[in-house]
Amino acid sequence: MKLNYKIILLLVLIIGQNSYAQMEASILTNLASGLGNSDADQVSDFESDDEDEIDEKRQETIDFSDSDYGYTGGKNFVNPPNVRLPNEPLDYFGYSYFQNNLSTFAPLKDVPVPPDYMIGPNDTIKIILFGSKNSKYELKVTRDGDIFLPEIGPVFVAGITFGDLKELLKNIISNQLIGAQVSVTMGTLRAIDIFVLGSASNPGMFSISALSSLTNAIMKSGGIGKAGSLRNIKLKRNGNVVTTFDFYDLLLNGDTSNDSRLMQGDVVFIEPIGKTVAIRGEVNKPGIYELKNDENLEHLLKYSGNLKPKANLSSTNITRINTINNSFDLLSIDMNKKDSQNFEMMNGDVVSVFSVPNNLKNAVLISGHAQEPGFYPWQSGMKLLDLFNDSDDLLEMTDLNYVLVKRKNKKSQLFEFHQIDLEDLFSNPESSKNLTLKDHDEIILFPSIITPDQITTRLIRDRYVLDKDSNMMVLEDEWTSLTYLRKSLMEEKLALDKKNTMSIGEIQTQPDLEMSESDIMRYYEYSVYDYCTLPEDLAIKIIEESGFRPKKSIPIEDLEKLSTPEDFLILQQTLERERIELQNENYQSEALSKTITSLCRQELLDPIIDLIERNDTKEKLSLVSVYGNVHFPGQYPLTNQMILSDAIKAAGGPKNGTYQAEIELNTINQQDKKFISKNNFASIKEASEIKLNEMDTVILKQLATDFQSVEISGEVFFPGTYPITENQTLGELIRRAGGVTEFGSIDAAYYQREAIQEAEKDRLKSAQDELKRKILLSSQAGGLGKDSLDSNSISQLTSLISSDTNDTEVLGRLVIDLDGILSGGIDDIILEDGDKLHIPKKIQSISVIGEVFVSNSHLYKKDLGINDYISLSGGLTSFADEANLYLIKSDGSVVSPSQLSSGFFRGRGSQLAPGDTIVIPLQVQPFSSIQATTEVTQIIYQMALAAAAVNSF
């Protein structure tokens, strides 16, 4: 049972939305067949057959939707051309009824006999007597037309109707059997032989019930062939035409008045098909219809279900065969005219009713960062503020200072742009800048700032269909589907050891089957209000900065906890809640918000700039560029009567610290056969007076007012972050912080500088890359150590180097003599932005790290030397390089191995000081073909130095 639930849920996820792997559709049938077998065994074969027929009908899905109803254009005024009419085959109207509904026209056995039924030989009449005499008789009409009524004798009944028969028998019995009453019904009815001839599908003689009508006979014969007429079906009796039947009366109007009951020897004759006319396009039932000689276009439209709402009455074509020229003529009809529907139709005509073009008129469009984007009704004299009364009609964080109105010139078919400052308009609604809108204007709104919490995710869904050849659920039009594009862009693959399809049989043979998270995949699109789609890497960066990566799949492990459909709904709700909570997290990063905003503004601007570049016929493009100290530098369309201040507003306005007295304006002028650049300068105050031209470039300069600060921590009276000015020194910083406390260790001061940190990272990376290169080159020469290493060993060695160095924290420590600086004995240090100074507490220990049995710190004693502290740490290991051990002083300076080799430090503790660190490096065996000992030692030294620097305070 547990496995079945997992399979059912897996199918729901796959077929519904959450995966794009194929799954055999037969699984559904097999699962369903396993439910309720005990009940099914009690059903008879006859009932099972009926249920199968019902199931087949249920499986036939009827689509009641109409994707082409109403305006079906895009989200803007640019729509693809209408395909006039697809060249699809048309069906002859009415003939499909004979294929799909033969059984429904068969006469039923227990249908009541009508009063006008004509009694004839072989009919069975049931008579019941009650009252003074109780008897029941079942009498058959003889060939002579008689029935023999006991106690009365023969009665002639042939040729009279059933209604007259009941009256006749009632009179006879009431006269001859006093006090007896009679009930007369029909039993088994006789069969009659009739002919169905002419253009029938299977012409011949047929034996049918005497109750059968003309239509029953046609159905019994298999229907009418495509060459037969539905409009001219004759019933002949004794050589005379009794009636002419028109199947269109039955199919279109439900009229059976001419559907006469047949008699023995009747002939149903189907004439050849008459005049046919096809109609296609915007009618409810396109097809090929048979018309009578006196019928015209009006009748054809009625037969085809009349016109659809989108039918273009002024655009109807008729293709007519020209037998004289052996060609086709194309005729046009305007059905707006009253007499148009009286148009005479000819055999072979094809009427094409076209659709109204998807041209939306009397409308304006609001797009971009809009609260309710879309089309709005336009009327003459309409103003921009008729759409926006105030800022409440706008989406939050809308840029009020930069709104574009895109307008198409109907004569030149080129676009022009108008720039609007809504903030000015809201404060002065009567201003002449309240632009009068025209039909098809597009108002484009831009965001001023977008925060990461405004990003939404959308699950990409695709349509699955049943592939009859493989019996699998597959993506429809996968090469053009969103899922295929997302799968290609995201470069995510299913596990290599998993198959994309699995049958129930395979699952049943693997009861312990475990499926990984990648077996059920989800694909998302990240966007802002549906007008801005974010690149995958940027969206993932935002999510990863929150410490959470969204699930692209549902772990199968979650399904093991499910036992009911309610549990499954809870799981779905939990996953959705996780996604919503992720969106609502507040990742307020100013730089990230600026990046998102710039990207979304650019997505709105790019189509405009592309349009200008493609359609601009002038020598210079109608673009201006704004760079420098503005929020959104880049290219912008040159709007109507654009001035310098408009360009600055388009770029988001000036940032803080802009040099307002001098704005650089670069203008390009043509001289002879080339463009010459000319620089002009203006102030912010003059920006509203300077008109811009094509390809002008505006540059706003930034004042050198960057805030610089340093940080001081530890044993000072006032630790914290301090702003600095040029040429301030370290000594001044300490004095501003109140000086060093009595517990501070000046000798162990730790000074960190960002520039040194970056330089150390580069040197460490370079040393690592060089060592890798030498290892690889030496191995190719066959000289790496005593035995050459294989490729796997070399890979492990280089990976080890990478992992060791990548995990190392590069601190960027600058060794200083703080005591000398404060006493004035040495030059002070000029502070730089980002510098950090830490004054640790006075340290009373000596640290021993490296190749000793226990790396540890020991209480400082004046009479102990290096060897003593090594002994206290358990002594040297067999891997220790005793000859190269060195000492890191508390101020970060290093006592080299050569200074220690004299034994001066080893035997005496007078030169050791609290806070010092003894480093015993690893014994390194030099490679035979490369001099790599120095490089390896240098990397290890950098790692030990970083650890010692951290340990020193």
Image: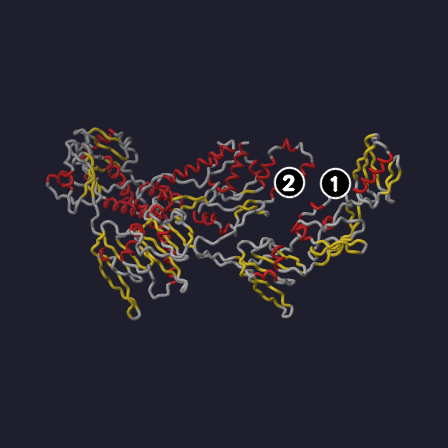
Residue type of the residue flagged with mark 2: Ile
Left or right? Give the position of 18 relative to 692.
right
Q: Disc 2 vs disc 1: Cβ atoms closer than 8 Å?
A: no
From the image, which quarter does the N terminus lie in?
A: top right
Q: Is residue 399 in view from this perspective?
A: yes
Relative height, residue 111 to residue 330 (above, below): above
Residue nearer the viewer, 794 or 630: 630
Residue marked by disc 1:
112
At mark 2, the secondary structure is helix
| 3D distance between C-alphas at marks 2 and 1 | 27 Å
Left or right? Give the position of 887 relative to 189.
left
Query: Could you tell me which residue is drawn at 26 percent across and 46 percent down?
Result: 758
Image quarter for residue 551?
top left
Q: Is residue 894 in view from this perspective?
A: no
Q: Position of residue 823 (x, y in %)?
A: 10, 39
Residue nearer the viewer, 485 or 895: 485
Q: Position of residue 663 (x, y in %)?
A: 23, 57
Residue type of the residue flagged with mark 1: Pro
Residue marked by disc 2:
54
Q: Position of residue 876 (x, y in %)?
A: 27, 33
Question: Around disc 2, counting alpha carbons within 10 Å, would you say few (fewer than 14), some (14 to 19), or many (20 or more)?
Answer: few
Left or right? Give the position of 597 relative to 281.
left
